[in-house]
Image (tube, rainbow, N blue to C red):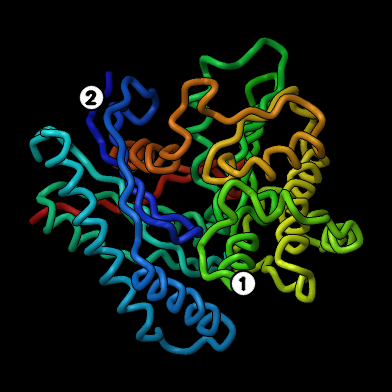
Amino acid sequence: MAQILKVIGLMSGTSLDGIDVALIETDGERVLGFGPAMALAYSPEERAILKAALDAAAGMATRGNERPQELDRAERLVTEKHAEAVKAFIAGQGLSEGEVALVGFHGQTVLHRPKDQWTVQLGMGEDLARTLGIPVAFDFRTRDVAAGGEGAPLVPLYHQALAETLRRPGEALAILNIGGVANVTYLDAQGGVLAFDTGPGNAPIDDWVMRHLGVPVDANGAHAARGRVDETIVARLLLHPWFQEAPPKSLDRQDFTSAPVEGLSLEDGAATLTAFTAASVAAARAHMAAAPARWIVCGGGRHNPSLMKALRDYLNVSVEPCDVVGWRGDFIEAEAFAFLAARAMRGLPLSLPTTTGVPEPMPGGRIATPD
């Protein structure tokens, strides 16, 4: 039987809000225990550095030029902040470095264009391993993309492991993660798994509010709640070829922006972008063998009451935050990269033909040791 490890997982998502840290006990196939978790927020200045890297990476993709210096500056920041987060976590929880067998380091995605075989996650795994004195698994997406896969989403195998105790006989279940981009793991009635990005998540809403108010999120969906949805704009956005494209498929954070609601009021723009995110999730049902009887929602989007209401309106079935079923909704992705780190160490697949479109189950990740 495979060894059970204590693994720390790290996630810095496309919302650019900060770093999530979570510890689980796993052998890479089962989740045997949940340890502590914490979050470390980025400062406004640090967010600005990461946003500059996103913008620079978009230009690199279109021009095919050399790596911009904004990426180097952001990569140093990402690595240093992740080291700070892990050290604070270990010290705060009274752990010894020897107790933690492995760290799963996703890094910060600044560019994801799998059809052009571009995927860029900032973060120096070797430097992090040396700084922490703990082996680090990193670079989870490159091998998948090089093999012709989408490189995303990578969380579905963790979703599948978590959902083992939730499955009802003969029922299809959807696990929706709403970060900057939204993605779904669809578990059919026979236990098969299909996964893909559904469309925009929080990113267009966040960017819209940031531009108008200088704050990073529509807290509690308050602005959207006061606005009126422009149904014409939502209908037009749903005509985008992306929604007809068969999965597996994945998006870059910049693929859907707040530009379509330019000219609307703050409130109406927030309401329309919120409705578009929910409508794009509903459109994803066309790619599923049978409509899920219930949706479990993870990620930051579940904290937005306006978005959760819109999801219930568009889906017209049970939609519940994952906290209701006992999951740690703010740390699912961090936990997932701990789980994937253990799989990478064992050489197990991180992705499947039905999750990223790779031709066969695909191992991935690299392991950096402290020496």
- Relative to the observer, which residue lies in front, 318 or 96? 318
Amino acid at pointer 1: His
Q: Can you give x and y, in whole percent of width and height, for residue 141 in the image?
A: 45, 56
Question: For residue 341, what is the image quadrant?
Answer: top left
How dense is the environment of label 2, judged by Cα within 10 Å: few (below 14), some, or many (20 and up)?
few
Residue at the extreme top: 169
For label 2, the residue is 3
In this picture, residue 18 sits left or right of residue 229 = left
Residue at the extreme right: 232
Sooner in the amino-acid sequence: mark 2 or mark 1: 2
Q: Which residue is at a point 37% across and 82% down the rendered structure image? A: 70
Q: Is residue 237 visible?
A: yes
Q: Spatial distance from mark 2 to mark 1, Cα to Cα?
A: 51 Å
- Relative to the observer, which residue lies in front, 111 or 48? 48
In this picture, residue 330 sits left or right of residue 370 = right
Question: For residue 290, what is the image quadrant?
Answer: top right
| Label 1: which secondary element | helix
Q: Which residue is at a point 49% across and 66% down the rendered structure image? A: 119
Q: Can you give x and y, in whole percent of width and height, for residue 51 in the image?
A: 46, 73
For label 1, the residue is 212
In the picture, the quarter occupied by the C terminus is bottom left
Q: Can you give x and y, in whole percent of width and height, for residue 67 in the image?
A: 40, 84
